[in-house]
């Protein structure tokens, strides 16, 4: 991923739990709401993972790739304004930002390698 102002891009894992109001909707309506709730800022990508069959902690994991903390902030603000959270259809469980291969960058930049 490209770097922005010496900040490495972030990968952010957002753990959410589908609430009964969401599960009660017909699948076509869920797709429609999801399509209008795309939290995309420029250069932000979103991948979705279903995990309800494997975990009681959350039902879904959304993986965002963001070029900067500012883009992450704007994306989360936009998400909070959508029906996904305003109705609410989902509960936010955790936001886990990460830097890919951070230890390798540290070693390369500090000559510890």
Image (spheres, helix red, strand yellow):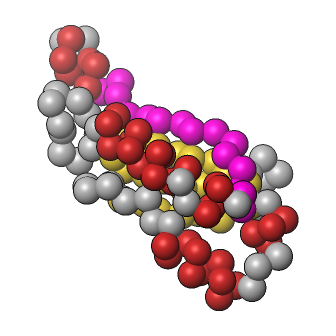
Residue 20 included in the magenta stretch of the image = no
Residue 57 screen position, x and y as percent: 78, 47
Q: Is residue 77 above or below residue 44?
A: above
Q: Residue at x 18, y 45 (%)?
A: 2
Q: Residue at x 47, y 45 (%)?
A: 77
- Residue 33 location, quadrant: bottom right
Left or right of residue 111, residue 71 in this image: right
Residue 100 included in the magenta stretch of the image = yes
The segment highlighted magenta reads 88-104
Q: Residue at x 47, y 36 (%)?
A: 97
Q: Nearer the viewer, residue 12 or 32?
A: 32
Q: Nearer the viewer, residue 75 or 54?
A: 75
Residue 104 screen position, x and y as percent: 30, 27
Whether residue 93 is visible, yes or no, is: yes
- Residue 5 location, quadrant: top left
Residue 86 screen position, x and y as percent: 65, 56
Marks counted in the figure total 0
Q: Nearer the viewer, residue 80 or 23?
A: 80
- Residue 60 location, quadrant: bottom right
Q: Nearer the viewer, residue 39 or 44?
A: 39
Q: Is residue 72 above or below residue 47?
A: above
Residue 99 screen position, x and y as percent: 38, 34
In the picture, which quadrant includes the C terminus? Answer: top left
Q: Residue at x 57, y 81 (%)?
A: 32
Whether residue 100 is visible, yes or no, is: no
């Amino acid at each position: 991923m490209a770097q922005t102002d010496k900040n490495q891009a972030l990968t952010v894992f957002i753990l959410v739990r589908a609430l009964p109001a969401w599960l009660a909707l017909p699948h076509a309506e869920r797709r429609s709401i999801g399509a209008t709730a795309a939290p995309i800022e420029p250069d932000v990508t979103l991948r979705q993972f279903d995990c309800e069959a494997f975990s009681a902690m959350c039902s879904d994991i959304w993986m965002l790739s963001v070029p900067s903390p500012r883009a992450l902030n704007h994306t989360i603000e936009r998400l909070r304004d959508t029906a996904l959270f305003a109705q609410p259809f989902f509960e936010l469980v955790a936001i886990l930002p990460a830097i890919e291969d951070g230890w390798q960058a540290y070693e390369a930049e500090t000559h510890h390698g």
